[in-house]
Image (cartoon, rainbow, N blue to C red):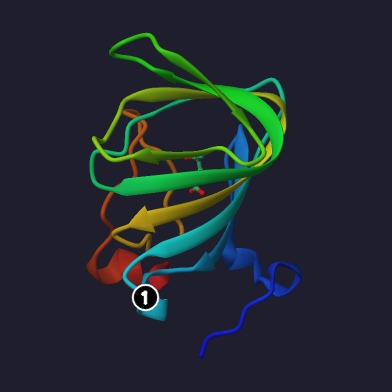
Amino acid sequence: MIVRRLNELTEDRNVRSDNWTSRRLLLRNDGMGFSLHDTIIRAGTSTRICYRNHLEAVYCIEGKGTVELVESGEIIPIEAGTVYALDRHDDHILSAEIEMRMVCVFNPALAGREVHDETGAYPILAGEEEAQA
Ligand code: 9YT
């Protein structure tokens, strides 16, 4: 059994961007087939994301914001207790009105250090990059 605690995560499992901090509790090397993150989305930020290589489920446990589907323009409110699942590699804009805390699950699992590329996706890391992740 793997036991890991948020307050004991090592620095390499804390990944920061301008708009969010992702605390990566379970990663590819843990062998679960998915990765599990506890992610903070900073208040007042909007991030365009399109995970062409991954499926992601996002469960909000604190805060308030919206997710906008770029293709349809639909805006979905998010608050604690809301889950959204990007089952179609949906191009979306995630905005936080009040700082949000999200539990995120990625399939396939992230290797560790991924941040969004210019298209809002995470790459599939392999080989040497994985060893460093
Ligand atoms: C909700 C979302 O996609 N935020 C961006 C960060 C990502 N969830 C992560 O790496 O934890």
Tell me the residue at 35%/29% (across/down). 118
Q: Residue furthest bottom?
A: 1
Q: Kindly identify the amino acid type of the residue bearing the numbered disc 1.
A: Met
Residue 15 against residue 25 in the figure, above or below: above
Tell me the residue at 60%/83% (across/down). 3
Total tally of numbered discs in the picture:
1
Q: Position of residue 132 (x, y in %)?
A: 40, 70
Q: Position of residue 46 (x, y in %)?
A: 56, 21
Q: Position of residue 100 (x, y in %)?
A: 68, 36
Left or right position of 100 against 66: right
Residue denoted by label 1? 32
Tell me the residue at 31%/28% (across/down). 119
Can residue 96 be seen here? The reply is: yes
Residue 118 against residue 21 in the figure, above or below: above
The yes-or-no answer for disc 1 within 8 Å of ligand 1 is no
Q: Residue furthest front?
A: 81
Q: Position of residue 58 (x, y in %)?
A: 49, 44
Q: Residue furthest top?
A: 73
Left or right position of 105 against 103: left
Residue 48 against residue 54 in the figure, above or below: above
Can residue 112 be seen here? The reply is: no
Tell me the residue at 24%/64% (across/down). 126
